[in-house]
Image (tube, rainbow, N blue to C red):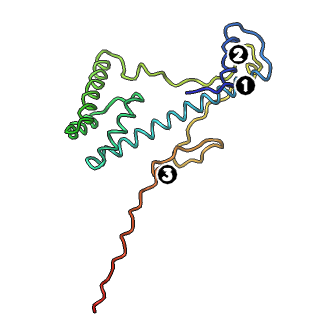
Amino acid sequence: MAFSADELRVLRRALAIALHPMPLSDEDVQDCLRLAGSVDEAVGEAGRLRAFLLADLARYRNALPGSATGYLELLQDALAAGYDPRPDDLAALRALRGGPLAAALLERCQVLAERSVRARLAGRSAGAAAPGPRSRLLALPGGRAATREPERPATPAAPGKPQKPGERPMPKPSEVFPPRRRPAPPPSEERAAG
């Protein structure tokens, strides 16, 4: 996540206020609330992107062996984003291990899967290192927003129910990547009998 220069200025000021509490001006409170909203939006977008990546990975895995190149690339991206390989991934990589990239990924995934199993056996969940969902920043101590009624975090709409204004639905893979159209065959040339 990258912050703009203006967002860094607001963040620096908020951290200074957190260390040395003092009353905030309305402008400072609004800046902090805008920054908190931007961070919440970025976290939500990262979650949607991760869900899309994992759905795409499963789609490519189900289309193996024809989608081997795309699957291996997506698996590398998913592993870089902290994905724990599933048994289906290990089985797919064993089937593809004739190639050097698949063999290297299989070795890497086996190490990650072994770590995950050991962590579970030790009583820790494999995702314990990942931070849990962050609560929304509603107000800073000393700010005017502390006297207001706290806002309730937005909950995702259930399937089939209308969404609240301002919420964007997660796009389906077919909406982001439309199906490829096959090129039309060249017109056949008929020979004239002569």
Residue 175 circle label: 3
Residue farthest toward the bottom in the current orientation of the protein: 194
Q: Is residue 155 above or below residue 176?
A: above
Label 2: which secondary element: helix
Q: Earlier in the sequence, mark 1 or mark 3?
A: 1
Residue 31 circle label: 1
What's the amino acid at mark 2?
Arg
Horizontal side of 151 relative to 160 (left or right) equals right
Q: Earlier in the sequence, mark 1 or mark 2?
A: 2
Q: Which residue corresponds to mark 2?
A: 13
What's the amino acid at mark 3?
Glu
In front here: 121 or 74?
A: 74
Q: Earlier in the sequence, mark 3 or mark 2?
A: 2
Q: Callout 1: 10 Å neighbours few (<14), some, many (20+)?
A: some
Horizontal side of 102 relative to 37 (left or right) equals left
In three-dimensional space, the C-alpha distance between marks 1 and 2, rounded to whole angstroms, equals 10 Å
Residue 49 in the image: state x and y as whole percent. 48, 37
Residue 192 in the image: state x and y as whole percent. 31, 88
The quadrant holding residue 31 is top right
Residue 60 in the image: state x and y as whole percent. 34, 45
